[in-house]
Image (cartoon, grey):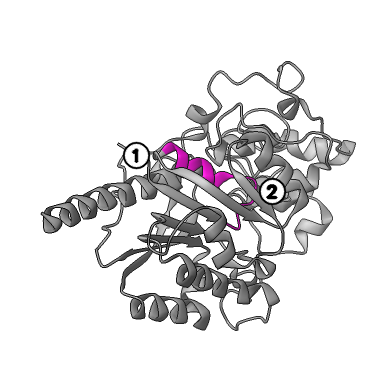
Amino acid sequence: MKKFTAIDLFSGCGGLTLGLKLAGFRVLAAVELDELAVQTYRANHRGVRILHDDIRRIKARPLRASLKLKPGELDLLAGCPPCQGFSSLRTRNGARQKRDRRNGLIREMMRFTRAFLPKAVMMENVPGLAQHRSFKTLCRDLRKLGYKVTWDIKDARYYGVPQRRKRLILIAGRGFDIPPAKESATLKTVRTAFANLRKPGKSRDALQNLSEQRSAKVLELIKAIPKDGGSRGDLPRSRQLECHKRVNGFKDIYGRMAWDRPSPTITGGCFNPSKGRFLHPAENRAITLREAAILQSFPRRYRFPIDASKESVALMIGNALPPTFIKCHANQIAKSLKAARKESAHDAR
């Protein structure tokens, strides 16, 4: 059977595209502005046409024509508009909405939908987006075009990702329902994710071998944190850094991951223990960038640049969509597309 087709808007380094491919979709094109993300995407998805540009400058109908598609022929339009403007941290835990020019990028999902009229639409984002007027407008406009819209807040740990990560997932079928993907009762843990992974400095993987620089004082603090889920709160006050004594919140700072649980949410600060619970469960170091990518459910051979700054690569990994999470939802979309195709063929007869 011919593969279902898809386009990936706001592709980042390719987590969404990989998830779609794992579900059997053929990704025709992707759009991304960031240079490093485009470089990474090209290294891993050579057969996909990627447009390195601001999506607001791309004309959707000429793109559709260049892909030899008529309105309604594309199976899936998928994307994750930059979410920093909707995050709870940037909006003071939801107390008020911050103005961020990236908030307007959600409108691009609708602009491309109108041009392509895909059979299905999928959008992923942070939970805070659900309260934003632009999201409510998107849902309304999709329904006006005949889409049956469903959305929910889902945790990636229930979809094969060894990480706690709550995300908003919107799925819409044009004239047909797409039921939500089923959650799994079996959780993947840090232990299973890191199984048989060589230690930094002893691996053939350059990303795993990237070194870290810590002061003697910080190294002593890290060594004192109890293994397998311990935190700085387990230490006597005399052993804590002065800056930590003055702050009551951010309890996960300088915390260790637990072996037999999913990891905390991987962010752009994942290589820095001062940014969260990013210490290795047993070794006296932060997790490596390869370990962070694995916790995002990227395969171990996924290529990331090692000549770029550690901060920029970590940010790219932290902002990525977990491919396994996307695969689960894309599988459900594919099932619904097949059912709709059969029903259409039956009606034609």
Frontmost residue, 199 versus 135: 135
Please identify the quadrant where the C terminus is shown: bottom left
- Mark 2–mark 1 Cα distance, whole angstroms, equals 33 Å
Q: Say which mark, if any, is on residue 316.
A: 2
Q: Is residue 203 above or below residue 131?
A: above
Query: What residue is drawn where x is 37% and y is 50%?
Result: 329
**The magenta stretch spans which residues?**
9-22
Q: Quadrant of residue 66?
A: bottom right
Looking at marks 2 and 1 on the same chain, the residue that comes earlier in the sequence is marked by: 1
**Residue 31 in the image, given as x and y percentages of width and height:** 63, 56
| Magenta run includes residue 117 | no
Q: Closer to us: mark 2 or mark 1? A: 1
Q: Position of residue 174 (x, y in %)?
A: 31, 66
Left or right: 41 with respect to 142? right
> Which residue in the structure is indicated by mark 1?
2
Q: Is residue 79 visible?
A: yes
Mark 2 residue type: Met
Q: In the displayed structure, does residue 143 sit left or right of residue 219?
A: left
